[in-house]
Image (tube, rainbow, N blue to C red):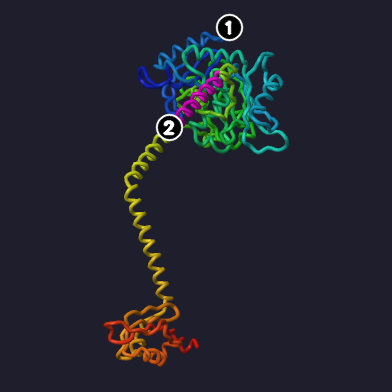
Amino acid sequence: MTRSTGAAGRRRGIFPARLALAVAPGQLVAVRLRGVLAPRPAEVLSCALEPPTAEGWPALEEALRELAGEMGASRGTVHVALLRRLAHARVLSLPPVRRAELAALVARAARRHFAVRDEPLVADAVRIPLAHEGSLAPALAACAPAALAESVAAACAGAGFRVGSMVPAAAALAAGVRALVPSARHGRTAVIACTAEGPELLVLAAGRPTRIQPLAAGAAGEHAPLATRILATLAGDDELAACTVVAVCGAGDGAAEVRDALLDDERFAARVASSPALERLPAEAVIALGAARAGAEAPALVPPSVVAARVRAARRQTLARATGAVILLGAAAGLHLDGVRREVAAVEARRREIRRPVRDALEARATVERMRARLATLATLEAGAPAWTGDIAAVARALPDSAHLRALTADSAGLRLAGVARSAAAVVPALEASRHFERVSLAAPVRWEQGDAGERFDVAAFRAPARGQR
């Protein structure tokens, strides 16, 4: 086992770990990640690995258990990058269809585009957002044997981890370079990766792979010829004339001479981009980091069993959340109903408290309204009733001094005078002489009663109309 970089000592955490794996037929590189939104490498371990067998890949499970124990991780999520000879990746021109249809199209035509045997495959493709003409558009396509993908997933599950993503090495390398070299996210970049599977050229446009080219490897120990061949490839390709160059070699994989050769060559020295993290990590660790950072921009090679397990888990989570939502909705409705009932009870109690004062106030209001109506009626009657003050004064002026009244009645037409006078015959002419009365006549015979100072008279007189009414 080789420890490339990381924290001192083991760390046992209570939270699930996040690991990224770069899997090759003879090597396994594990990277412990920290951070959620932008994972970064915290520890890198690698070990030799026996190739898979027809029954599965028990060596991968054993190696993963050993590396996880060394890192202090016993459960969590792993993101897997399948290196060459395990997965194949190419940039193809495909019809502009949806991603699910792209995956089916690549799976049907995989043997035409990739050197694979006649066996079930896991295939996928993602669009590359570049300008294109005609009916075809560039896409990054990848495939891997379904049995191999199932073996990798089973080995991860046997070691206590669930597979988060499984992508080809080319897509993971592009994502890892984007994460570690910000300048590779813009323009065109030529990435030289030297892994245990051999050197590889990856051309990026705005951080997305547009060309994947394995380079011929030299004999063991011939590092200078390898660097020379890589420099010749870069210098002889017109497409790479103005590209930024990134060398992904690491410090301990025996291919650091490639970066030194690029820096010593005046044709490329000004175009070489790097970062301390990139120089510290081996190429397989950069690829493993990219597997965790690629997301939906990389073809997914997750086997059908993992997809089915995710679907079942998603359904269970959906059902659990729906059930929880119904329960919470019912609880909220019950609490709301209880609150409404409490408010209604409080309102009813308050209504009972103010019922008597309100009734008294309503009765007092009704009484006031009745009084107002009566006053209005009286005002109307007073406004329409005749004024008798002037008539009474006229009667007082017209009657002889010897006469006095015992009764005076009036109606809308006239007066009725009853009284005693020394001479009743003088009463009628005196009233007729007044301009306030007309048609003055005796209403009853003149009589005399014992004890009276004169004759009793009963006279009826009508009011004379006003001058303007004549």
Residue 317 is one of the magenta-drawn residues: yes
> Residue 336 appears in which quarter of the rendering?
top left
Which of the labelled discs sits on residue 55, or is there none?
1
The amino acid type found where label 1 is placed reads Glu
Residue 462 coordinates in the image, percent (x, y): 44, 84
User: Toward the viewer: 183 or 62?
Assistant: 62
Amino acid type, mark 2: Gly
Q: Residues within 10 Å of mark 2 (few under 14, many from 20)?
A: few
Image disc number at residue 137:
none
What residue appears at the point 57 percent right and 31 percent down from the top-left corner? 190
Q: Is residue 202 rendered to the left or right of residue 326? A: right
Q: Where is residue 398 in the image (x, y as percent from the top left)?
A: 36, 90
Does the image show residue 457?
A: yes
Tell me the residue at 49%/33% (across/down): 181
Query: Is 393 rendered above or below residue 354?
Result: below
Residue on which disc 2 sits: 334
- On whether residue 193 falls in the magenta region, the answer is no
Residue 97 point in image, percent of width and height: 68, 31
Badge 1 marks a residue whose secondary structure is: loop
Q: Earlier in the sequence, mark 2 or mark 1?
A: 1
The residue nearer to you, when weighing 335 against 346, is 346
Tag count: 2
Q: What stretch is highlighted in magenta?
A: 309-331
Asked if marks 2 and 1 touch (Cβ < 8 Å), the reply is: no
Mark closer to the observer (2, 1) = 2
